[in-house]
Image (tube, coloured by chain):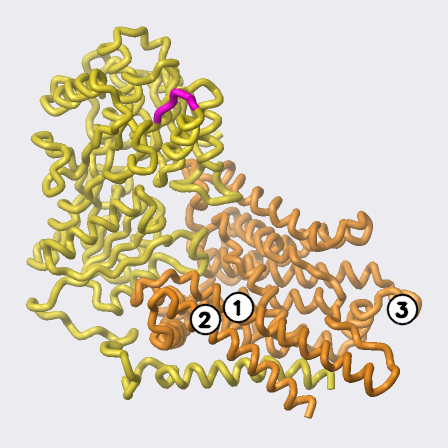
Chain colours: A orange, B yellow
Amino acid sequence: MNFARRFASSLVAIVAALAVAIGLMLLVDAPPFEALKLLVEGSVGSDVKIADTFMAWAPLVLTSTGLIVTFAAGLWNIGVEGQVMAGAIAASWVARTVDGPVWLLIVLTMLAGMIGGALWALLAGVLKVYGRVNEIFGGLGLTFVAQALITYLVIGPWKRPGVASTSGTEPFPEHAWLPTLPGLRISLVAVGVALVAVIIIYFMLRGTRFGLRLKAVGKNSRSAYLLGIPTTRYMLAAFAIGGALAGLAGTIQATGFLHRLVPAVSGGYGYLGILVALLANSSTIWVPPVSFFFAMISVGSTQLQLRLNLDSSLGGVLQGVLVLFTLLAQGWQSRRIAREAAEASAAPPVKLVES
Amino acid sequence: MRRMKGWSRPALIIAVLALVAAACGGGGGTTTTAAPGTTAGPGTTAAPATTAAEPLVFGMILVGPQNDRGWSQAHFEAGKYIEDKLGAQMIVIDKVNPADRPGTSVEQVVDDMLAQGAQLIFATSDDMKDGIENAAKQHPDVPMIWSSGDSAWKEGKAYAGLDNLGNIMGKMIYGKMMAGCAAGLTSETGSIGYLGPLINDETRRLASSAYLGAKYCWENYRGKNPDDLKFEVSWIGFWFNIPGVTSDPTVVANNFFDGGADVVISGIDTTEALVVAGQRAASGEQVWAVPYDFHDACNEAPDICLGVPYFNWGPPYLETAKSVVDGTFTATWQWLAPDWNDINNFDTSPVGFVEGPGLSAENKAQLDTFIAGLASGSINLFTGPLNYQDGSVFLKDGETATDQQIWYMPQLLEGMLGASSSE
């Protein structure tokens, strides 16, 4: 019955989100169902489109999965965006300097990306644990620093000869590109890495001593500490894992999609990952499908302009409205549960949103 | 129960989305069953080969917003021009750059346009070089144009050898000379700011042209000493403002005025310099601006607008479109001078200059003399002696520059302030 109630509230959220989206389209005189159809066609309507959607999916899955680890530890790691950039910088450095066979470059760029992202996240972690800087502010600040660092590299030491433009670096040598399937822009390595990350994190959080203790830290770090869990170390570990996954996302963006370093290398997947993690309600297993849906909107929304002359930021509006209504429904639901629980027994009310 | 909660919500989301997807057309796009209201739906399956009777379909890829009152809008209107003249159909997408569309590459856009039946693609930004060259390699049978580029110039430094990728660019050096002249004639303080985009061959060439025009008119029409003319270039880092990445052009323009400049010449895609000058003039300052790219660009602050050098891409793009229809397209590098009989003839001149209401009658007459001199060839500003910024010789006394020398200037000119390259 609880399930039925949840079903109802989720349904309300989705219908409301769609209604708002449709209303918006009607406001701008756009045919809403045609637009939705184009979103679907433009993202999964052909082999090429499916491949493109998966190339947006892979980095999004990685950032979202990383966020689930930090969320499990009770950390609002809002600085993922900067960790993606840091990973991309490190990977770009390898791609620009190391010569060697493709497989070696894949391994080295990915390792570099993971290290870069992990270090950037650890900075936020150290600021939180030792400097008492809230990770939200530390993370956001470090994102600005990472952005400035990329811009500096692109227009300074890594500039194209004779050019000073924030557009981006020279393309990497081709041996540093992630290999793609013939005729498509998809890299199986990228998709595989994302899948492996999901599987590892799923089992880590579910079945390992580390994962359970991490969740204990997240639920109540004071009690966890009293029970003998070294909470500081666990928090830093969560930052490092989340950052490493974000750094991998940055690597894939740089070596698999853009083939160069650009200021917008993160693709916004850090921020989008936060929405995915919220919608997936911190459940690892739901990250791949929810990410796929978001990737569909991102890739498919180009069609809105190409075919309907609509501004394709409408896709972003749809993503945002959906998350907003889902969160509203969640909040409303847990509020009702809390009230009913309080009425039924004298038990203390459940917290509205569990961190 | 906790777990149920975690599972059920996303499950529902997916389920409902699947329903939605199913409701709007089987979710595939390959079937064209009785979906009401949709007439044509070839999706991404190959469009039927167009016969000669069908109108030309062409793709227009813009780097900025199609209504930016600058570079991108000039291209958009050229597309409209082809539609009018040829009964062709344009597929347009704007804001194709990594900051605005991080998940979209030029190659993807070209694929989409071809799937919609495009037979000709215009990639209209310097920034699209890598993307359009890749796309041209992937689709060797589709004619494409990379505007402002040099990939099809056999004598150039970046010849790509692609038979289907041509280049078109107007000789904006003349437009910039007129812009510089208008500034040099008008400036009271003798200090002119040039709001530059990023630094490359094109922007060094155009900033230098503006300087040459300013210096010429300052010296010859006003009889002043060129050493008293301050001409400073400040680069923002890209063709338009990207918050957090480029310098803010509004701030840069204000800095120019704060630093004593009373005319700012814009070299970027958008109109910040004019807007800032308009605001400051409204508060009583004596300042002016020269926007860029688009023939109606003065409209945002006409009273202080000295004029605008603009691109009129319509005629050369129309020629290209016709050649595709005729089957005579060849990939050439075109660097097109204004139609000197009437630089503002919309059907013939690829580059023009609209004089603005901010220009005094006296200065207007002198600017017209200057333009006539450029037209007749009696004024050639790329004539030596000219030195580069570091003092090395660009052109010896009496030497006139070749196209290569002008196109590929490695530095700004002596007498200009500002960076010639990075750092």
Q: Which residue is mark 1?
A: A321
**Would you say the magenta stretch is mainly helix, strand or loop?**
loop
User: Between marks 3 and 2, how big is the CA–CA gap?
Assistant: 44 Å
Image quadrant assignment for residue A68: bottom right
- Label 3 vs label 2, nearer the camera: 2
Q: Residue B364, position in %: x, y?
A: 20, 21
Q: Which residue is mark 3?
A: A223
For marks 2 and 1 on the same chain, the one whose residue lies earlier in the sequence: 2
Magenta stretch, residue numbers: B284-288
Q: Please, what secondary structure does the residue beneath circle 2 have?
A: helix
Q: Position of residue B45 (x, y in %)?
A: 27, 76
Q: Amino acid at mark 3?
A: Ser
**Residue at x 41%, y 71% (from the top left corner):** A51
Which image quarter holds the C terminus of chain A? bottom right
Residue at position x 62%, y 71% in the image:
A327
Q: Are marks 2 and 1 in contact (CB under 8 Å)?
A: yes
- Asked if residue A199 shows in the view, the reply is no
Label 3 element class: helix
Q: Is residue A242 above or below residue A341?
A: above
**Residue at image x 48%, y 40%?**
B246
* Whole-number angstrom distance, CA of label 2 to CA of label 1: 8 Å
Disc 2 target residue: A21
A194 with respect to A298 (left or right): right
Residue B130 vertical position relative to residue B115 in the rendered view, above or below = above
The residue type indicated by label 1 comes to Val
